[in-house]
Image (tube, rainbow, N blue to C red):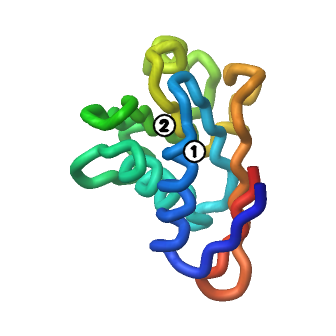
Amino acid sequence: MHRVSNNPEETQFIGLEFARKATAGTVLSLIGDLGAGKTEFVKGLAFGLGVDGPVTSPTFTILHEYRGGRLPLFHMDFYRLREEWELDEIGMDEYLEAGGICAIEWGDKFPNRLPPDSIKVFFSTDVGDRREIVW
């Protein structure tokens, strides 16, 4: 699938549309440069799942859990992780098996730790706020 976004709201809407079809156990590896729209996409996922409250980047906390929607949403960010063993410290395998949606920013950093059926979502920037989102 290939989508184009011209602003953060459109990126959120693409995430919302994705959430409507997502099933328990879906793992998304969000791949793109800083500022490419990964967190905006997750905001849309959360909204589409019916999660209330603000959604923020887990860059410094590594993991945010959002519950109360149709499915739980586990938003991870591997950007600051240096070693694969750090995934064990955050209990990543338990989250992968928890029956929710796992949205992992910088998931390509440790690809061998993701399930083989993970969906790679690529974010690329263009002129201005234009983004291409491909999965």
Question: Can residue 106 be spotted in the picture?
Answer: yes
Q: Is residue 93 left or right of residue 43?
A: right
Image spot of residue 60 (x, y percent): 39, 44
Residue 3 in the image: above or below residue 59? below
What residue lies at 70% left-to-right and 30% top-to-bottom?
118
Q: Are marks 2 and 1 in contact (CB under 8 Å)?
A: yes
How crowded pointer 1 is (Cα within 10 Å; few <14, some 14-19, many 20+) is rated as: many
- The circle drawn on residue 76 is 2
Q: Amino acid at mark 2?
A: Met
How crowded pointer 2 is (Cα within 10 Å; few <14, some 14-19, many 20+) is rated as: many
What residue lies at 65% left-to-right and 39% top-to-bottom?
29
Image spot of residue 90 (x, y percent): 44, 20
Circle count: 2
What residue lies at 37% left-to-right and 30% top-to-bottom?
72
Q: Secondary structure at mark 1?
A: strand
- The circle drawn on residue 105 is 1
Residue nearest the observer in this picture, 105 or 23 = 23
What residue lies at 70% left-to-right and 61% top-to-bottom?
133
Q: Can you say which quadrant of the picture contains the N terminus?
A: bottom right
Q: Is residue 105 left or right of residue 74?
A: right
Q: Amino acid at mark 1?
A: Glu
- The circle drawn on residue 89 is none
Residue nearest the observer in this picture, 30 or 44 = 44
Q: Secondary structure at mark 2?
A: strand
Question: Can residue 80 be spotted in the picture?
Answer: no
Mark 2 or mark 1: which comes first in sequence? 2
